Every structure is written in structure tokens, then in C-alpha cells.
Amino acid sequence: MLNQRSKIKDQNLSQNSKLEVKYRAFYLSLKIIKFLENLSNNQSLRIISDQLIRSVTSIGANIIEAKSSASKREFLNYFQIALKSANETKYWLALLKELSVNNADKIQYFLNETTEIAKIIGSSVLTLKGKTKL
């Protein structure tokens, strides 16, 4: 019985995280932007920071665009772009983690959250592809 309740609770958490993916993406963007403001100001980190801000904010922006799309196909396209942005964000974070060893733990947190968001978006994309005739 306890095991069954645990599974139900896990399913509810999973459903809530899917419903809240736009908020998770928003707050991830906000946290990364604030974190980057405190990094050293050398040229390479500045360039990586600019790219990272573009890619991480693109995740949430495309999720929001998807919510107001006119068709399932358009919705799917925006979610696919959001997924690509999440994957790009992981790249920039991994690069930043190697260059900013003193902040590795914080950057790993961002990587983990980005990975979770990407999994949610990817799952949605697969579901949509199964339901949408392309």
C-alpha cells in the first residue's frame, strides 16, 4: 500500500512539473542571469554568458509562444525550438563549468534543472508527435 501511494505521489509531482515547466524555465533564466552578473568580467566568460542568456531565455519564451499558437503543428514547432534551446543551454553551462571551477556546484545545479526541463519538454514533444499528423 505504501509503495502504491509513493507511485501516485511521484505521478502527481511529475504532472505538476509538466504543468509548471514554463515557471521552471522562467525561474531558471532568472537565476542564471543573476548568477552571471557576479562572474568575472573577462572577455571569454562575457561571450559565453551572452550566449547562455540567449539560449536559456529562449526556452521559456518558446514555451509561452507555444501556449498561444494557432495549431497543434505550430505548438509542436515551438516546443521543439524550446527543446533545442535547452540542449544549447546545457552546452554553454558545461563549458562555463569547466572555465569557472570555483562555481562548479552552482553550475551543476543549473545543468540538472535544465536537464529536467529538457526531459519534460522532450516528453511533451514525443506525445505531441504521436497525436499530431505531420
Image: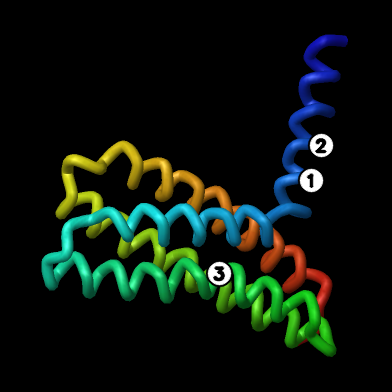
Element at badge 1?
A: helix
Q: Is residue 68 left or right of residue 114?
A: right
Q: Circle 1 sits on which residue?
A: 15
Q: Circle 2 sits on which residue?
A: 12
Closer to us: 91 or 51: 51
**Residue at image location 84% in from the left, 89% down from the top:** 70
Element at badge 3?
A: helix
Looking at the rendered structure, the kind of residue marked 2 is Asn
Please give the label number shown on residue 59: 3
Q: Residue furthest right?
A: 1
**Residue at image location 35% in from the left, 41% down from the top:** 106
Image quarter where the N terminus lies is top right
Residue 75 spot, x, y in % from top left: 75, 80
Quarter of image, res 48? bottom left
Looking at the rendered structure, the kind of residue marked 1 is Gln
Residue 31 spot, x, y in % from top left: 47, 53
Residue 54 spot, x, y in % from top left: 42, 76
Q: Are marks 1 and 2 in contact (CB under 8 Å)?
A: yes
**Residue at image location 83% in from the left, 87% down from the top:** 71
Quarter of image, res 105? top left
Q: Is residue 54 left or right of residue 22?
A: left
Q: Residues within 10 Å of mark 1 (few under 14, many from 20)?
A: few
Q: Are marks 1 and 3 in contact (CB under 8 Å)?
A: no
Image quarter where the C terminus lies is bottom right
Residue mark closest to the camera, 3 vs 2: 3
Q: Residues within 10 Å of mark 3 (few under 14, many from 20)?
A: many
Distance CA(mark 1)–CA(mark 3): 19 Å
Distance CA(mark 3)–CA(mark 2): 23 Å
Closer to us: 61 or 118: 61
Closer to us: 12 or 106: 106
The answer to whether residue 18 is above or below residue 14 is below
Looking at the rendered structure, the kind of residue marked 3 is Ile
